[in-house]
Amino acid sequence: MRILIAEDDQVLADGLLRTLRAAGAAVDHVPNGSEADAALMTSTEFDLLILDLGLPKMHGLEVLKRLRARGSALPVLILTAADSVEERVKGLDYGADDYMAKPFSLQELEARVRALIRRGQSGGGAELVHGELSLDTAGRRATIKGTPLDLSARELGVLEVLMMRVGRVVSKEQLAEQLYGWGEEVGANAIEVYVSRLRAKLDPAGVKIRTVRGFGYMLEEFKEKKAGQ
């Protein structure tokens, strides 16, 4: 899950970055509305925009208005001052999905982020299923036959990307883009390490991650074992 935060308060932005990255998200941050608008027009695929309304250079409502005018259905969570009722109403009218008044609880923000991303993924479904493997994308939990898998946040991220593209090759670059925010250092062999660890944990359940040399990785279509096999 990749999130863009548009917030000019650096202290608040740092807190959001730490909290959401600890939850396993790839998070990018811009400090003003112009940079937010530009970022939303790039090829980067975001799963959620956390948008402060009182941004310099371009107001948050204008960022939202332009986003919706481009036909984007990206979920948007607005952050606004507690007393700006008129702006909250305008934000919802312009197409925001939810809002939070400052100050707010980071725990509540995490819950709202999970709910919005769940709503935006898989037609609103939070669970991805592949044979005996299940992944709760909102609760960030993976199980095999109901037994929890011990996965790191990065391993969960790799698994989610592969499960959403079963039977299709995903390049290392695509995985890195989904797992890391701008400016985060990506080790030369980091993706290989995460895939290797994940493969070892999934193999006993018959879930296969195939390496397509020169291209990337692919989660193979699940095949039911026939009697006697």
Image: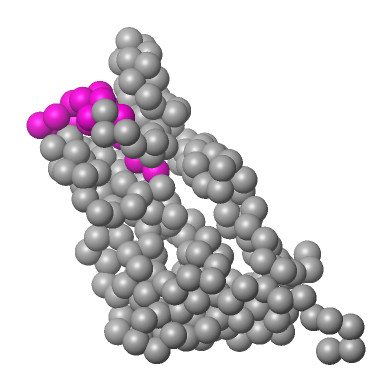
Residue 72, image quadrant: top left
Residue 14 seen in the figure: no
- Residue at image position (38%, 62%) is 178
Residue 54, image quadrant: top left
Residue 18, image quadrant: bottom left
- Residue at image position (62%, 45%) is 125
Q: Indicate the position of residue 86 as horizontal and vertical percent values.
A: 32, 10
Residue 98 seen in the figure: yes
Q: In which quarter of the image is the C terminus?
A: bottom right
Residue at the left extreme of this rendering? 57
Residue 47 vertical position relative to residue 171 in the rendered view, above or below: above
How many marks the image carries: the answer is: 0
- Residue at image position (31%, 72%) is 173
Q: Which colour scheme appears in the figure? A: one colour
For residue 95, side relative to residue 163 (left or right): left
Q: Indicate the position of residue 131 as horizontal and vertical percent values.
A: 72, 69
- Residue at image position (71%, 76%) is 223
Which region of the structure is painted magenta? 48-68
Residue at the top extreme of this rendering? 86
Q: Quadrant of the N terminus?
A: bottom left
For residue 53, side relative to residue 214 (left or right): left
User: Is residue 184 rendered magenta in the image?
Assistant: no
Q: Indicate the position of residue 122 as horizontal and vertical percent values.
A: 56, 48
